[in-house]
Image (cartoon, rainbow, N blue to C red):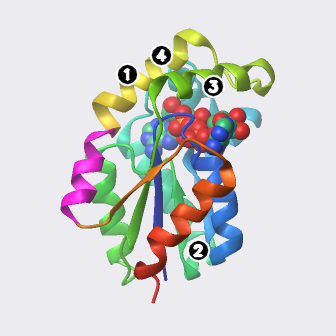
Amino acid sequence: MYNLVVFGAPGSGKGTQSARLIDEYGLYHISTGELLRDHIARDTDLGRIANEYISKGQLIPDQLMIDILEHTIENNPDTANGVIFDGFPRTIEQAHALDKMLAKRGAKVDAVVGLEVADEELIDRLIKRGLESHRSDDNPETIQNRLKVYNSQTAPLRDFYTQAGKYHAIEGSGAVEDIFHSIRESLRPTRS
Ligand code: AP5
Ligand code: MG
């Protein structure tokens, strides 16, 4: 089982690069944001709760998110070969929970790819996408809040995973294909 975390600020390209990585490595992709948006689209109880947070650019509470993720892994045999975690963990508490969840299965986080992009470019990308995405969080005010939340609650994971020797910093601006190439090269030694 090979477990990869694709990490980065809102708009850094986590979804775009994950789509390439699943093809390359045959891993199962879990985007916690997409999972929640699917609940919102189906108007489930969880979707209604999640929308309250997402539309304001806030994180949904840790324990709720952790339970959803564990349920997804448990009920999905396709995760057995390994998973790309896109948008999870987003707090230190979630990172500890992920370690525990994987340890139960005799596995671990093998590597973390951190897509690093300047704030101005992130904002540009998200505002552009907002013109057609219909995402309740792709508007200028919520984008600013998403970045604030990222810097205060999620960015500390960079140090957390650097200290664990798992963090691979990747320059996340430029052509999608070139970024994918850098990720592949950077991960090569972690794949046995
Ligand atoms: P989530 O869905 O994870 O959103 P996000 O982190 O804000 O990031 P995005 O999905 O917007 O961007 P991305 O990094 O995937 O980039 P993308 O490839 O799309 O989370 C949404 C919300 O859900 C959170 O705010 C929170 O409320 C909740 N949530 C989710 N997970 C949670 C958790 N673990 N705990 C608590 N709450 C959670 O690219 C962005 C745009 O840029 C696209 O238009 C793309 O085409 C373009 N692009 C990509 N690469 C390039 C490039 N190289 N050059 C130019 N443009 C590019
Ligand atoms: Mg995404």
- x and y percent of residue 15 in the render? 63, 48
Q: Tell whether circle 3 marks a residue whose Cβ is less than 8 angstroms from ligand 1.
A: yes
Tag 4–tag 3 contact (CB < 8 Å) = no
Classify residue 135 as left or right of residue 158. Answer: right
- x and y percent of residue 96 in the render? 27, 58
- Displayed quadrant of residue 29: bottom right
Q: Residue at x 31, y 55 (%)?
A: 95
The residue carrying mark 2 is: 79
Q: Is residue 158 magenta?
A: yes
Q: Residue furthest bottom?
A: 192
**What range is drawn magenta here?**
155-164
Which of the numbered marks, if any, corresponds to residue 148? 1
- x and y percent of residue 90 in the render? 38, 44
Q: Examine the rendered structure and indicate whether residue 187 appears above or below residue 177.
A: below
Quadrant the C terminus occupies: bottom left
The residue carrying mark 3 is: 126
Q: Examine the rendered structure and indicate whether residue 7 appears above or below residue 19.
A: above
Q: Residue at x 55, y 31 (%)?
A: 50
- Could you say whether the residue bearing mark 3 is in a helix, strand or loop? helix
- Could you say whether the residue bearing mark 1 is in a helix, strand or loop? helix
Q: Residue furthest left?
A: 163
Q: Is residue 119 visible?
A: yes
Q: Nearer the viewer, mark 4 or mark 2?
A: 4
Estimate the spatial distance between the alpha carbons at disc 3 and disc 1, rounded to whole Å: 15 Å
Classify residue 98 as left or right of residue 6. Answer: left
Classify residue 51 as left or right of residue 191. Answer: right
Estimate the spatial distance between the alpha carbons at disc 1 and disc 2, rounded to whole Å: 32 Å
Q: Residue at x 31, y 39 (%)?
A: 155
Estimate the spatial distance between the alpha carbons at disc 3 and disc 2, rounded to whole Å: 30 Å
